[in-house]
Image (cartoon, helix red, strand yellow):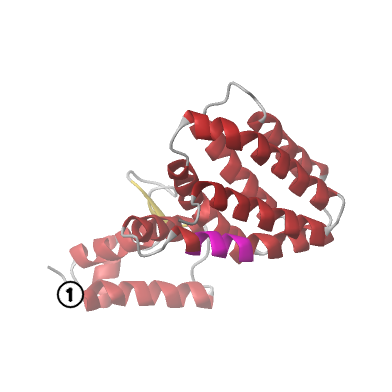
Amino acid sequence: MPTARSYEAVLNSIEADLKDGKLKVGDQLPGERALAVRHGISRASVRDAIRVLDAVGVVRTAAGSGPASGAVVIANPSAGLAATLRLHMATHHFPVADIVQTRIMMETWAAVEAAKRPRDAGQELTLEGLLHAMANPLLDREEFHVLDAAFHVLLSSLAGNTVITAMMESLRQAVQSYVSASVDSDAMWAQIVPTLRTQHEGILNAVIANDGAKAAQAIRHHIQWFHAQTHPIQ
């Protein structure tokens, strides 16, 4: 097998080129042969490096020829973060309680910032559309969880912080999975979902009213309430 040092040479070189502006989003990486020659390594080692970059959302790979083929630089930081979070949650390295605490820290801050910033009508309409979709009584639990996660991610993005947006996007599937796993019956879900809908409306109304403190308090209560309902203290 190629050594870690072999493919790390390619990763370090591409990182340096991105920092220096020699590579930018939309650019195509040199071919495998050119990278192998440049670094004095095998093409197999180059492919390992490209797989790593693909997994962490720095490049997109495609077969064929032309400007869209090969490895093209993209910017999708949440892809790598999401995969890492899911895997570590699967190993139980990240307890649900820690995910909940992290959500509270990020989302309450984001709510305060979102309430301060100007918003376009389209953003508010999209959030209202998500609430309207979640109000559908025929919606099944899994569809609700998808919309719920999308609501929280979009709301946090209104803070205008790209790192928070990427982190919330990466948490989307983690949040969706733990919320889904927390509700073990339709009867339990039927008791919880009306309150969730009301809480979502209160959060959005506070942001639209530019009341950051109220929005942050509503989000904190919303997240803590759901966790308390589904993970009661023994």
Q: Which image quarter holds the C terminus?
A: bottom left
Residue drawn at 74 percent across, 59 percent down: 217
Q: Which of 8 and 153 lies nearest the eye of the viewer?
A: 153
Q: Which of 130 and 122 lies nearest the eye of the viewer?
A: 130
**Quarter where residue 91 is shown:** bottom left
| Residue 5 locus on image (x, y percent) | 23, 78
Residue drawn at 55 percent across, 47 percent down: 229
Residue 102 belongs to the span the image colors magenta: yes
Q: Would you say 191 lies left or right of 95 here? A: right
Q: Amino acid at mark 1?
A: Thr
Magenta stretch, main secondary structure class: helix
The answer, for residue 157, to whether it is visible in the render is no
Q: Is residue 195 above or below residue 167?
A: above
| Residue 56 locus on image (x, y percent) | 40, 61
Q: Is residue 23 above or below residue 195?
A: below
Q: Would you say 226 lies left or right of 54 here? A: right
| Residue 113 locus on image (x, y percent) | 76, 63
**Quarter where residue 151 is shown:** top right
Residue 96 belongs to the span the image colors magenta: no
| Residue 226 locus on image (x, y percent) | 58, 48
**Residue picked out by circle 1:** 3
The answer, for residue 46, to whether it is visible in the render is yes
Q: Which residues are magenta?
A: 98-105
